[in-house]
Image: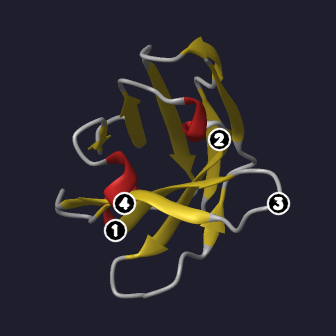
Amino acid sequence: QVQLVESGGGLVQAGGSLRLSCAASGDTFSNYAMGWFHQAPGKQRELVAAITSTGSANYADSVKGRFTISRDNAKNTVYLQMNSLKPEDTAFYYCAARKSWRVSYEYWGQGTQVTVSS
């Protein structure tokens, strides 16, 4: 069982930056692949960025070149650095975890709101 707690959301102007953090507890963090999802009102939850247990990352096309996912296994934390933010990035952002051999994410945080004003 893994518990995930996100932090770092807030209100920022377009073009600005935010860094989200997700602290994990309850199991061996390095055994898990991690992902950041977002969900805007009336829309489905979408994968924004993911990082494997060995540190390989991939991104949604909409955020490539602007967002960076990283992990610190010593701190049991995954980060999402968001630069050049756009109003369309406004959403609730969730951290998720899955065992490295699984396809679906098993554990979710409570989410944090990111609002980008124009």
Distance from Cα at disc 3 to Cα at disc 4: 19 Å
Q: Amino acid at mark 2?
A: Val
Specify few, some or many for label 1: CA neighbours under 10 Å numbering under 14, 14-19, or 20 or more: some
Residue 97 visible in this rendered orientation of the protein: yes
For label 1, the SS is helix
Q: Residue at x 29, y 38 (%)?
A: 74
* Left or right of residue 95, residue 42 in this image: right
Q: Nearer the viewer, mark 2 or mark 1?
A: 2
Distance from Cα at disc 2 to Cα at disc 1: 18 Å
Which residue is more in the foreground, 42 or 102? 42
For label 3, the SS is loop
Which residue is more in the foreground, 46 or 73? 46
Q: Amino acid at mark 3?
A: Gly
Q: Which residue is mark 1?
A: 31
Q: Which residue is mark 3?
A: 42
Q: Which residue is mark 4?
A: 60
The quadrant of the image that shows the C terminus is: top right
Q: Amino acid at mark 4?
A: Ala
For label 2, the SS is strand
Dot 3 and dot 1 residues touching (CB under 8 Å): no
